[in-house]
């Protein structure tokens, strides 16, 4: 694994100042930049060769931009390169369309498999749809996170295989904010995937917030975009109904949650985020369940935030690079 050293900026003769000079304890770089400057993010994945970092930095500096931080990962003996850069720039001097064109040239130069640039203040928020079943802790947390501005997404709709009455907390919240709710009751031989696909055509990715239905391979192929899922990580694993009670009765001492991308293989997609917490003999079943649900909420929210901030890149066949 190769990472940028503290002397890296000095090796780039065109760098305006060192990355470390921008890291002021207790302050965000947003507060120290002029109001005319805007924050950008760029991720890059290509075959490894000499000079990639220099060209990426030169691209930004040549347009008057300044790198705030950069992270590079080159797996040993793999000859592939991953990077994530954060920078500030003047959108008048470097228009968004020109930025896209500049990074596209770099992408072609290095035969990149992935090159994405995002300007949070200028680009539309990611549009997502949320699928949930009866359990509401993850769904409610996502809705409140969206309302508070903690999640940089727009929720287009919520879908569920579980019917909710008009006076329930979730329905009242959705109605108050104008978010449609679709109850799609599955039947034997019909998971309502055609209707789901129709409702999510204009989304950037999907979130399964404890959605207890298995999406088919045909659905995944037809949707063709990323789907983020969350599930408990009780150790050892407990299958079937009420896994928390099974784990509690077995006296487990460690619980967790895993957020991952959805693939055809159940709960086996590339992992985005994992969290763990200790439990003890002092926990009763209620506190045990609360701890487990809190982990699931935090893990899912962090995975979504990381994804929106371009911190997650595919790595090998079933792994991720998480910057």
Image: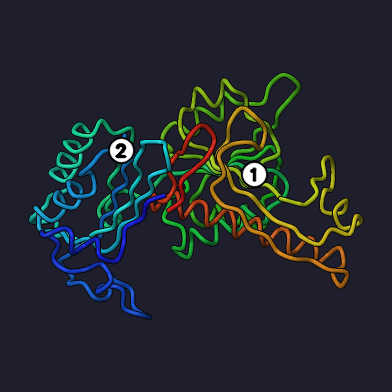
Q: Residues within 10 Å of mark 2 (few under 14, many from 20)?
A: some
Colouring chosen for the image of the structure: rainbow
Looking at the image, tell me whether mark 1 or mark 2 is earlier in sequence order.
Answer: 2
Query: Looking at this rendering, what residue extends furthest in the bottom direction?
Result: 26
Residue lying at 76% horizontally and 21% vertically, measured from the top left: 188
* Mark 1 in CB contact with mark 2 (< 8 angstroms): no
> Label 1 to label 2, Cα distance in Å?
41 Å
Give left or right: position of 111 versus 177: left
The percent coordinates of residue 226 (x first, y second) are 48, 36
Question: How far across and how far down the image is residue 283, in percent?
Answer: 84, 69
261 lies left or right of 257: left
The answer to which image quadrant residue 149 occupies is: bottom left
What label sits on residue 246 in the rendered view?
A: none
Nearest the eye: 148 or 151 = 151
x then y, percent, for residue 62: 9, 53
Q: Position of residue 131 (x, y in %)?
A: 60, 41
Residue name at image x 51 percent, y 23 percent = 221
Element marked by disc 2: loop
Depth order, front residue of 159/300: 300
Tell me which corner region of the image, top left, top right, bottom left or bottom right, holds residue 181.
top right
Residue 149 vs 159, above or below: the answer is below
Farthest residue toward the right? 249
The residue singled out by tag 1 in the image is: 132
92 and 235: which one is in front? Answer: 235
Mark 1 or mark 2: which is in front? 2
User: Please, is residue 286 above or below residue 175 in the view?
Assistant: below
- Disc 1 crowd rating (10 Å Cα; few below 14, some 14-19, many 20+) is many
- Helix, strand, or loop for circle 1? strand
Residue at the spot 12% in from the left edge and 50% down from the top edge: 95
Circle 2 is placed at which residue position?
A: 48
Q: Residue at x 67, y 33 (%)?
A: 266
């Amino acid at each position: 694994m190769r990472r940028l050293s503290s002397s890296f900026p000095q090796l780039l003769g065109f760098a305006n100042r060192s990355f470390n000079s921008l890291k002021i304890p207790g302050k965000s770089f947003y507060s120290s930049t002029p109001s005319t400057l805007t924050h950008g993010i760029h991720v890059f994945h290509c075959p490894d060769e000499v000079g990639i970092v220099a060209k990426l930095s030169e691209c930004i500096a040549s347009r008057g931009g300044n790198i705030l931080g950069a992270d590079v990962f080159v797996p040993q003996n793999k000859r592939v390169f991953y990077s994530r850069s954060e920078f500030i720039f003047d959108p008048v001097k470097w228009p968004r369309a020109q930025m896209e064109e500049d990074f596209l040239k770099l992408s072609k130069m290095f035969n990149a498999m992935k090159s994405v640039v995002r300007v949070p203040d200028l680009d539309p928020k990611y549009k997502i749809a949320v699928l949930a079943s009866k359990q509401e802790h993850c769904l409610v947390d996502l809705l409140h996170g969206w309302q508070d501005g903690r999640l940089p997404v727009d929720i287009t709709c919520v879908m569920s295989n579980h019917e909710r009455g008009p006076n329930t907390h979730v329905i009242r919240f959705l109605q108050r904010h104008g978010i449609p709710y679709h109850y799609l009751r599955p039947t034997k031989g019909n998971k309502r995937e055609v209707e789901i696909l129709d409702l999510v055509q204009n989304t950037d990715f999907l979130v399964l917030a404890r959605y207890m239905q298995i999406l088919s391979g045909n659905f995944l192929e037809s949707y063709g975009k990323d789907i983020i899922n969350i599930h408990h990580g009780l150790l050892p694993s407990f299958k079937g109904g009420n896994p928390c009670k099974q784990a509690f009765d077995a006296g487990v001492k460690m619980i967790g949650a895993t957020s991952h991308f959805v693939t055809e293989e159940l709960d086996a997609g590339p992992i985005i985020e994992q969290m763990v917490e200790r439990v003890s003999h002092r926990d009763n079943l209620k506190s045990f369940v609360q701890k487990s649900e809190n982990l699931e909420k935090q893990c899912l929210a962090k995975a979504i935030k990381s994804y929106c901030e371009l911190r997650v890149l595919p790595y090998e066949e079933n792994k991720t690079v998480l910057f």
